[in-house]
Amino acid sequence: MTTTHTAELDVLVIGAGFAGIYQLDRLRDLGYNVQLWEAGAGPGGIWYWNCYPGARVDSEGAIYQFAYKELWKNWRYRELFPGWAEMRDYFRYVVDALDLDRSISYNRRVVSAVFDETNHRWVVQAEDGSTVRARFLVPCTGFGSSPHYPDYPGIADGAFTGEAGIHHTARWPQGDIDMTGLRVAVIGTGASGVQVAQEAAKVASEVYVFQRTPNTAFPMKQKQLTDAEQDELQVDIGERLARRLTTFAGFDYDFIPENAADLDPDTRTQRYEALWEHGGFRFWLATFQDILVDPKANDTAYAFWRDRVRARVKDPIVAAKLAPTEPIHPFGVKRPSLEQTYFDIFNQDNVHLVDQYETPIAEITSKGVRTSDAEYEVDLVVLATGFDSVTGGLTAIDIRGVGGQSLKEKWEDGFANHLGVTTKGFPNLLFAYGPGSPAAFCNGPMCAEAQGERIVQAIEYVTRGGHSRIESTDEADERWRQLEEDIVNASLFPQGKSWYMGDNIPGKKRQMLLYTGGLTSYLGEWESSVQADYAGFTIS
Ligand code: N01
């Protein structure tokens, strides 16, 4: 441990993903003495850590970038849906273009932050012993910075001795692993599991996919972009990026103002086919407006999806496990993924589906994975088991507010905050892309800018007004919590078990972690607060 000099800052930002980079750049432009601490060795946030084979964005690259400062003018993605390496190139481009490296400390993981009530300062400490004092603390820890490791016997004590090891997708070795000729176990079939399995199937000698809940994935329609296609995308990119601000999920498309339940089956099917053929998330986020609220409408989307998937899988038993006759949960309430070859790989001799409902995993052994009826000997175990999502990145840091109160303890029985940004008792702690914000229901860079700018303005309001503290009131926190609950309860989301609702973490309070009212409604709520002199916040 090396203890470095305790610096005095206006703002410390945590995390060099989209949200953190926006905060750093905007606040520095405004003249604040601001630094950013990042646990990884480079920028990118989730794109730094998730470098497993096949990791890839599921938004089209063209709209998965910053709009501000016209950074897009000098950037072109080479793939329609960029992979992690290209995302890293993008982050490097942004950091260099904005000259941010001089304000970022990499390899510096924040472990604690304590509010000094006398001086109104956050005293922040990193794992390497570095400390800093800052007036404002802005954690931008994202929705997926705290990996979830299942509690199977054998994981914690490192039982597995296979040649390529056991790795969580979000802690993949930076030097990569060549899966050629290996026997690979992929545990989990969320977006990460689907992506790894597709890649492993190309080169591994055997792939065992351990599925608990089937993934309602649909076609990505990925492609490499020619120079001409890249040029064409540049033509209206400014307008497309701007349009994101006007839609429910911050994409450049939105739900159809039409109900699936009102249409005759042929017309409805035609609409689904068009969305399906277009690829990407349109089948989820540019579909009929009643899909996520009306069970009958939802069933029509599920049936379309199921039949399309089953048509691709030769073995009817495997097909029925991948796409069950009846939905396990309403379609779209557990985050779907985009796939390229995922359902086709199960037609290959080297790919095997292991149904965890029938034969659950009992332990990780020295040789591989033992279920209730067999031991699968492998060379590599991939834990694609997700995250302690949204709140996990914040509660992984020992954050202590007024009176030494711990944020983790405060939120043990569920979180409450105002506008997804502040919580009572933690002055000058403004979290971006966190719980109660649209975050993962919203295009990442878009949300980083739209919500991020409101945070910047709040800091400006406090500072230029000569104040020293901002926090929310208990009433505002409770109002926002209740509003979120009311909105989500009017939808089908609570009917599915998902990380959105905290279901994937044993013991985690069941609560929708994100604001589901849509980006435009969220920004409207901010505007109302600002117009009323930051109603819901106590500024002193
Ligand atoms: O994690 P997940 P993820 N025993 O939580 C299973 C984003 N993302 O990393 O569904 C057995 O979705 C679990 O089973 P079940 C995206 O927002 C984006 O894949 O709980 N199985 C599930 O199958 C995504 O939604 C991209 O029954 C266990 C899987 O592990 C989010 O990140 C790429 C288990 C976890 O799926 C998370 O995705 C990757 C246990 N104890 C991720 N615990 C893009 O394409 C968990 N599972 C941009």
Image (tube, grey):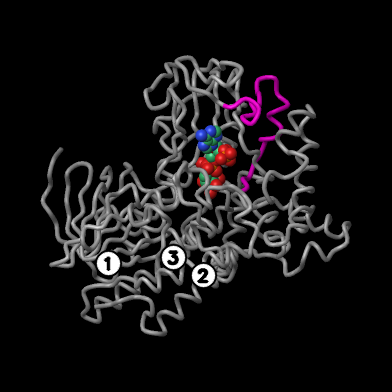
Question: Left of 495 or right of it: where is 443?
Answer: left
Q: Which amino acid does label 2 sit on?
A: Leu
Choose mark 1 or mark 3, whichever is in front. 1
Marks 2 and 1, how far apart in space? Answer: 24 Å
Dot 2: few (<14), some (14–19), or many (≥20) neighbours within 10 Å?
A: some
Q: Can the viewer see residue 56?
A: no
Q: Can the viewer see residue 269?
A: yes
Choose mark 2 or mark 1, whichever is in front. 2
Marks 1 and 3, how far apart in space? Answer: 20 Å
Residue 513's place in the image compared with 238, above or below, is above
Considering depth in this image, is 23 or 296 the residue closer to the camera?
296
In the figure, residue 127 lies in which quadrant? top left
Q: Which residue is drawn at 45% across and 75% down?
A: 526
Which x, y percent locates residue 135?
A: 21, 66
Q: Which amino acid does label 1 sit on?
A: Asn
N-term-proximal mark, 3 vs 2: 3
Dot 3: few (<14), some (14–19), or many (≥20) neighbours within 10 Å?
A: many
Marks 3 and 2, how far apart in space? Answer: 23 Å
Judged from the image, the secondary structure of the residue bearing numbered disc 1 is loop
Which x, y percent locates residue 175?
A: 40, 30
Quarter of the picture holding the C terminus? bottom left
- In this figure, which residue is indicated by the disc labeled 1? 428
Judged from the image, the secondary structure of the residue bearing numbered disc 2 is helix
Q: What stretch is highlighted in magenta?
A: 336-360
Disc 1: residue Cβ within 8 A of ligand 1's nearest atom: no
Which x, y percent locates residue 430?
A: 33, 64
